[in-house]
Amino acid sequence: MQYDPSLVRRPAGRDSDLPEPVSFEEVFAALPLLHPTPRSWAELAAANLPEFLADHAVCEQQVAMYALSLAGYYPDDAELVERTAALAAEEVQHFRRVVAILRQRGWPLGGRRRNRWAQSLRERIVPGHEPWTKVDRLLFGALVEARSCERFTRLLEVVEDQEVAHLLADLGPAERRHWELFYRLAGRGGDADALAARFLHWREFEAGLARGLGVSPTVHG
Ligand SMILES: [Fe+2]
Ligand SMILES: [Fe+2]
């Protein structure tokens, strides 16, 4: 999805070198999320950018690996293999971009760490129950992308660092496009209402997790 200029709002007094901010409310309304991240999380993340970016890099790396794992699970699904491989390549570019910023600034790149939100979500996937396992793997991907888009948009509201603001302004729309892709792949050949009902359970579960978050300066913290 291309950047939509109709969503642009420029609050008075904002630095003209920062990217045009988008309206959080409008972006949120287009996402499948049921609980908005509080603005206080963005203030915490903006005040702790080394920690946020180190975690962000790992998120990009892990979603790339997850997308490739889907291609590995379903090698006979030509469309899924092509789309998830392309998505993984895009996430690797995101990863490299975040790593470049960390390196330029002499900030450490974090390694693997516990992501309770992602772990709790992923535990809902039950292996060996096809075709639903595949659907759930794709719905999990959709929610990861949607929450990342939401968090980037939230942080973009408050971050003063120009380089990070430009990064978030580019990546937010990409992650939005990705959740839509995962959802579309999940719905191929199935009943749209049944898919929406199944996704609603996922969305409600995710909202329950999200209500306990917003207290750590990480992408899903
Ligand atoms: Fe990404
Ligand atoms: Fe993504």
Image: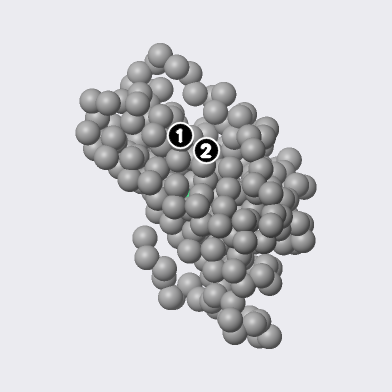
**38 on left or right of 184:** right
Identify the element where label 1 is drawn.
Answer: helix
**Callout 1: few (<14), some (14-19), or many (20+) C-alpha neighbours within 10 Å?**
some
Type of the residue with mark 2: Gln
The residue nearer to you, when weighing 41 against 63, is: 63
Instruction: Give the quarter of the image for residue 67.
Output: top left
Up-down relation of residue 14 to residue 122 (above or below): below
Residue under the image location 77 percent in, 47 percent down: 215
Instruction: Report which residue position mark 2 lands on.
Output: 62
Identify the element where label 2 is drawn.
Answer: helix
Residue 104 in percent (x, y) is at 62, 61
The residue nearer to you, when weighing 140 against 85, is: 85
Up-down relation of residue 124 to residue 96 (above or below): above
Residue 191 in percent (x, y) is at 30, 33
Instruction: Give the quarter of the image for residue 74.
Output: top left
Tell whether label 1 touches label 2 (CB within 8 Å).
yes
Quote the CA–CA distance across marks 2 and 1.
6 Å
Instruction: Report which residue position mark 1 lands on.
Output: 66
Residue under the image location 68 percent in, 85 percent down: 13
Q: Residue furthest top?
A: 128
**140 on left or right of 89:** right
Residue under the image location 27 percent in, 26 percent down: 75
Query: For the C terminus, which image quadrant?
Result: top right
Residue under the image location 27 percent in, 40 percent down: 82
The residue nearer to you, when weighing 112 against 200, is: 112
Residue 137 in percent (x, y) is at 43, 30
